[in-house]
Amino acid sequence: MASVMDSSSTDSKDSGRFQLGFNALPQYGFGPDLTFSSLVEHNPFLFRVYTPKPLSPFFDSSEPFFIAQKFKNSYRYTVQDFQAAGSSSASLDQSAIPDSYADVANHMDWTKKSSSPFVTTSFSFAWAIWEATRRYRSNPKQAVEIAVIDAKAVAEGAVTALELLRKGSPKE
Amino acid sequence: MTITAYLLLIIESRRHPDHWKWYRFATEAQDVLIYRYVPGTAVLASIPILSIIPKLPSYFLNPNPNEEDKSFFSNLTWDVTQQRSGYQQFCQQMSEQFLRSSAEERLRDTTTSSVRLAMSFLRPWFQRYALKDFQGAVDNVSELAYIIARWPGQWWVREHTEIWDLIQSMVHVIGEEVRDAQRLHALNEVTRLQGVVSELQLLTDEFMSVHSRSGSDESADEADPSEPSSAPVSPPPAPLVPTEDPQLLPGQAPSKVETASCVLTSFLFGAFAALFVVNSQKRDLALHFT
């Protein structure tokens, strides 16, 4: 993890482009670039708003921390099981990400969340703060946390929601 | 109707009725979807929102908070009860407040306040990595602080190129303090553990010396023939009828009475011991035979 973060930061600052804000996301929405693979170069953090549950005392950091609803009940909670259940290769290939309109629709539709193969995150720290305060205010009994995720560490399985929504073809 | 328009109509008709609502949500939240799972190794830190609120830059906070409203969110400038559609308005409001503030306040918000918020997001990770990879830890917190700094007014931050250098310097100073504090803590811990080990060593030495002294006393007692021993000297199997020992002097020969007394005492002692042992095992024996 650290090595991934370190290399990204070194590249960005050595090139002298990070501070000038090239490829930086705008405050609201996206610019002309919508693809995760190009945005991640200068937006190395993802944020996830969630309600924490107690981790197992035997939790190991190599295990899944967030699991998509679709896989929560299907597999045990180890990375090896996910890898075995997925493609034959140990690491996830970008092409293995489902890009059907039905998958992204299931994710965006609150009534069908349980069949979503995705975990939601955001490039925006401000959106995370805004959403977390809104959730906490609506239900103060539930703890709300913001997880900071190393975007490059999940790059193989990550895609912007807009990419998928735009890809959706009518035949699907 | 052209073919393109016809195809677009087909596409639109097959889309979910909420398609454009989802598109707007995904746009404003800058949504990223991760397939299957996020491994624990990719999660740098997880911080409760209640710990983050007090670290927000000033444009998030109300300069004149309502004294009567004591709720946790009363100090915030936006209405936290807003529904999702209010996020765009929230962004505009924060930018306006940032750009309305003085240049000094803007500089403070884009440097120290941004570093403060970035540190609150990454504190546990930073403390873990400050000793392992100092420069990497500093760089990552600086990047997050810069992302925070440019959020309310990108053009303003782009014009002030010194902000990046200031952020880096601040995080570097914090990193040095954290690293030195951790080193000091580690040194204190080592010193404390060395003290514990020394005390244990002293105790061990003392125990060994006491033990060896008492052991040597006992062996000295056994070895010293001049000291009268309270324990009866185990006699050699004493014959009932003493034999004539040519090496013994006439005055040193044990008397018959003494020999007989020893034998009798040994016999009685053995008998008592046997009775005691049998008595203690009587219950077991009884259980065994019944």
Image (cartoon, helix red, strand yellow):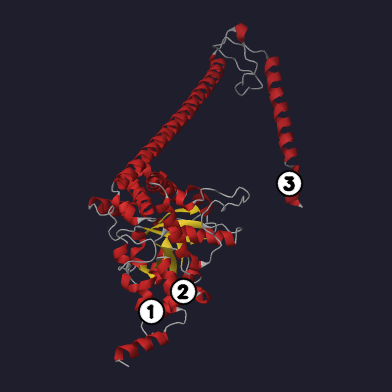
Front tag of 3 and 1? 1
Q: Residues within 10 Å of mark 2 (few under 14, many from 20)?
A: many
What residue does disc 3 label? B285
Q: Residues within 10 Å of mark 3 (few under 14, many from 20)?
A: few
The amino acid at mark 3 is Leu
Spatial separation of the CA atoms under disc 3 and disc 1: 82 Å
Name the image quarter holding residue A151.
bottom left
Disc 1, SS: loop
Q: Position of residue B166 (x, y in %)?
A: 32, 43
In the depicted view, which residue is nearer to us: B176 or B212? B176
Q: Position of residue B132 (x, y in %)?
A: 35, 44
Q: Kindly give the residue lying farthest to the bottom in the view shown.
A: B1
Spatial separation of the CA atoms under disc 2 and disc 1: 13 Å
What residue does disc 1 label? A100
Q: Position of residue A42 (x, y in %)?
A: 30, 58
Q: Is any atom of residue A142 visible in this view?
A: yes
Q: Is residue B56 left or right of residue B250?
A: left
The amino acid at mark 1 is Ser
Q: Kindly give the residue lying farthest to the top in the view shown.
A: B251
Disc 2, SS: helix
Name the image quarter holding residue B91.
bottom left
Residue at position x 38%, y 38% from top? Answer: B179
Relative to B224, is A97 above or below? below
**Mark 3–mark 2 CB contact (< 8 Å):** no
Same-chain status of marks 2 and 1: yes
For residue A160, the mark is none
The amino acid at mark 2 is Met
Which comes before the other along the chain, label 2 or label 1? 1
Callout 1: chain: A
In the depicted view, which residue is nearer to us: B69 or B266? B69
Q: Position of residue A101 (x, y in %)?
A: 40, 79
